[in-house]
């Protein structure tokens, strides 16, 4: 995670943290580590697609406003 985030535009890459841990602390740790979203396993593929689409849409919208 850190090698990507230290690149010039690395902090702008959307990322979803997928783990087997579902607790609130785990979600907080994933967000603190730089992930925009956290989901726990088992993962519903439709949920992953919906979240990825949301993150991509947000990033595309922010590219138009900067």
Image (cartoon, rainbow, N blue to C red):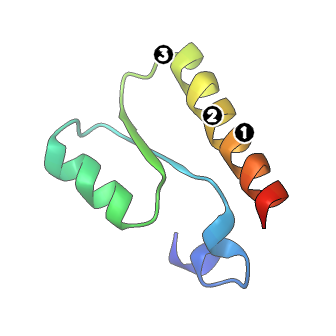
Q: Say which of 42 and 53 sits in front.
A: 53
Q: Hey, which quadrant is residue 37 in on the image?
A: top left
- Which residue is found at the position 61% from the left and 72% from the top? 11
Does the CB distance between marks 1 and 2 fall below 8 Å? Answer: yes
- Which residue is found at the position 67% from the left and 73% from the top? 10
In the picture, which quadrant includes the C terminus?
Answer: bottom right
Q: Say which of 27 and 44 sits in front.
A: 27
16 in relation to 46, above or below: below
- Which residue is found at the position 68% from the left and 31% from the top? 53
- Kindly report the distance in space between the C-alpha atoms of the residues bearing marks 1 and 2: 5 Å
**How busy is the neighbourhood of tag 1: few (under 14 within 10 Å), some, or many (20 plus)?**
few
Q: Does 41 sit left or right of 47 as displayed?
A: left
Secondary structure at numbered mark 1: helix
Secondary structure at numbered mark 3: loop
- Kindly report the distance in space between the C-alpha atoms of the residues bearing marks 3 and 1: 20 Å
Q: Give the percent coordinates (x, y) of residue 46.
A: 58, 14
Q: Hey, which quadrant is residue 51 in on the image?
A: top right
Q: Give the percent coordinates (x, y) of residue 38.
A: 39, 42
Secondary structure at numbered mark 2: helix
- Which residue is found at the position 51% from the left and 77% from the top? 2
Q: Say which of 19 and 37 sits in front.
A: 37
Q: Which residue is tagged 3?
A: 44
Q: Does 9 sit left or right of 29 as displayed?
A: right
60 in relation to 43, above or below: below
Q: Which residue is tagged 1?
A: 57
Q: Give the percent coordinates (x, y) of residue 55.
A: 63, 42
Q: Give the percent coordinates (x, y) of residue 5.
A: 58, 76
Counting residues from the start of the chain, the first of labels 3 and 1 encountered is 3
Does the CB distance between marks 3 and 1 fall below 8 Å? Answer: no
Counting residues from the start of the chain, the first of labels 3 and 2 encountered is 3
Q: Which residue is tagged 2?
A: 54
């Amino acid at each position: 995670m850190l090698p990507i985030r230290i690149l010039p535009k690395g902090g702008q890459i959307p990322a979803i943290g997928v783990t087997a841990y579902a607790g609130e602390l785990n979600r907080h740790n994933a967000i603190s580590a730089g992930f925009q979203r956290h989901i726990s396993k088992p993962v519903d593929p439709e949920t992953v697609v919906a979240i990825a689409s949301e993150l991509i849409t947000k990033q595309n919208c922010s590219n138009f406003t900067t």
